[in-house]
């Protein structure tokens, strides 16, 4: 059965930057096994599969190589960019039905802004437990790590400097211990590491997400974690302004950037706006 697709590099204004995502139009009808197999075929971190919705403008399903997840950030930008490139949406507001709820999106030219849901703050995690996942010392973590979700849960972990961020190496055994200790939430992702300095002069934060197989070793840009990270930094008083520029992917040669705005006071955040661009790299037809 044929399905049209677009390959979009999200959180970038040109091809080969940011994070790639293949958007399969009408593919929400496919089985989970087929969707995961397609993600593995592309060697991307995530792909999306769209379909009609009775509660929003479009339904979006998000898949890693290993499982379906309720929401993801860069695939949301990629999905809307793909629809825009095909003339399916124009400037203005639309809504996406996701496993994490209805996600409002605003399109203004080539800039796509999603409003991620109000954060859910989970437990603080032992710094030594998290540090072991990245092969660093607990003293390299400068604030108590905490699980936060704006649609997908990550343990947000603030590191002392860029050099520490660059040293990270994923320890599979430590990751298993971390996952067992933090809880049984099957949506829990690997720790999200951040420094309070940009990769460039334009940035305010710089982050990394190291991933376990069968995903690629590292995610070039993680939009869902960026939202969770923003909520954490604002709620913990680690940033002075709720608006900032987040950067990721530069060490992979895939620089990505997002404009971020946390909504609401530090103790009552109502959502997080994450904004970026998307570049269409290729289009085609799948025969599944």
Image (tube, helix red, strand yellow):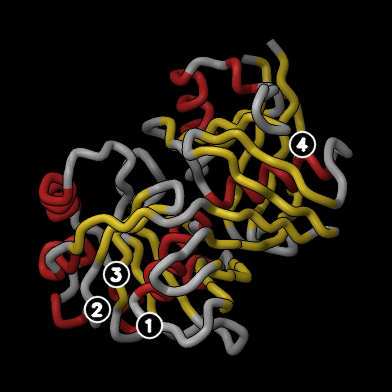
Where residue 36 appears, x then y in whole percent? Answer: 46, 27
Q: Count residues near mark 2 (Cα–Cα under 10 Å), then give few for <14, some for 14-19, many for 20+.
A: some
Q: CA distance from mark 4 to mark 2?
A: 44 Å
> Disc 4 and disc 1: Cα gap in Å?
42 Å
For disc 3, the marked residue is: 157
The label nearer to you, 4 versus 1, is: 1
Quarter of the figure that contains the C terminus: top right
> Which tag, 2 or 1, sits closer to the chain's start?
2
Instruction: Tell me, yes or no, whether the two marked residues, 4 and 3, touch with CB atoms within 8 Å.
Output: no
What is the distance, in whole Å, between disc 2 and disc 1 at their CAs? Answer: 9 Å
Seen in the picture, residue 285 relative to 57 is either above or below; the reply is above
Q: Which residue is mark 2?
A: 143
Of callouts 4 and 1, the N-terminal one: 1
Q: Would you place residue 104 above or below residue 69 in this image?
A: below
- C-alpha span from label 4 to label 3: 37 Å
- Tell me if label 3 and label 1 are in contact, CB under 8 Å: no
- Estimate how packed mark 1 is, as few (under 14), some (14 to 19) or many (20 or more) residues with alpha carbons within 10 Å: few
Residue under the point 47% across and 87% down: 240
Q: Nearer the viewer, mark 4 or mark 3?
A: 3
Q: Position of residue 67 (x, y in %)?
A: 39, 31
Tag 2 near tag 1, CB within 8 Å = yes
**First along the sequence among labels 4 and 3:** 3
Q: What residue is pinned by disc 4? A: 283
Q: Position of residue 79 (x, y in %)?
A: 68, 42
Q: Residues within 10 Å of mark 3 (few under 14, many from 20)?
A: many
> Which image quadrant for residue 144?
bottom left
Foreground residue among 40 and 185: 185
Do tag 2 and tag 3 residues touch (Cβ < 8 Å)? no
Which residue was labeled with disc 1? 238
């Amino acid at each position: 059965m044929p399905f049209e697709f677009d390959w979009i590099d999200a959180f970038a204004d040109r091809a080969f930057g940011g994070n790639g995502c293949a958007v399969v139009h009408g593919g929400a009808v496919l089985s989970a096994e087929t969707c995961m197999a397609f993600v593995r075929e592309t060697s991307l971190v995530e792909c999306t599969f769209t379909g009609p919705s009775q509660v929003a403008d479009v339904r979006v399903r998000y898949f890693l190589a290993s499982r379906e997840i309720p929401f993801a950030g860069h695939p949301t930008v990629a999905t809307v960019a793909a629809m825009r490139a095909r003339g399916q949406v124009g400037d203005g507001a639309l809504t996406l039905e996701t496993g994490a709820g209805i996600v409002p999106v605003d399109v203004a030219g080539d800039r796509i802004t999603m409003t991620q849901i109000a954060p859910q703050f989970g437990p603080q995690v032992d710094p030594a437990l998290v540090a072991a996942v990245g092969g660093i010392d607990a003293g390299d973590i400068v604030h108590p790590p905490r699980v936060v979700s704006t649609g997908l849960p990550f343990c947000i972990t603030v590191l002392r400097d860029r050099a520490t961020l660059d040293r990270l190496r994923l320890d599979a055994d430590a990751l298993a211990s971390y996952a067992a200790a933090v809880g049984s939430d099957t949506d829990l992702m690997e720790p999200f590491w951040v420094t309070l300095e940009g990769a460039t002069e334009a940035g305010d934060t710089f982050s990394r997400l190291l991933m376990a197989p069968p995903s690629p070793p590292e995610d070039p840009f993680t939009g869902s974690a960026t939202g969770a990270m923003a909520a954490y930094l604002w709620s913990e008083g680690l940033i002075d302004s709720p608006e900032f520029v987040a950067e990721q992917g530069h060490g992979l040669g895939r620089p990505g950037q997002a404009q971020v705005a946390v909504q609401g006071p530090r103790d009552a955040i109502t959502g997080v706006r994450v904004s970026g661009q998307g570049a269409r790299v290729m289009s085609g037809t799948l025969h599944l």
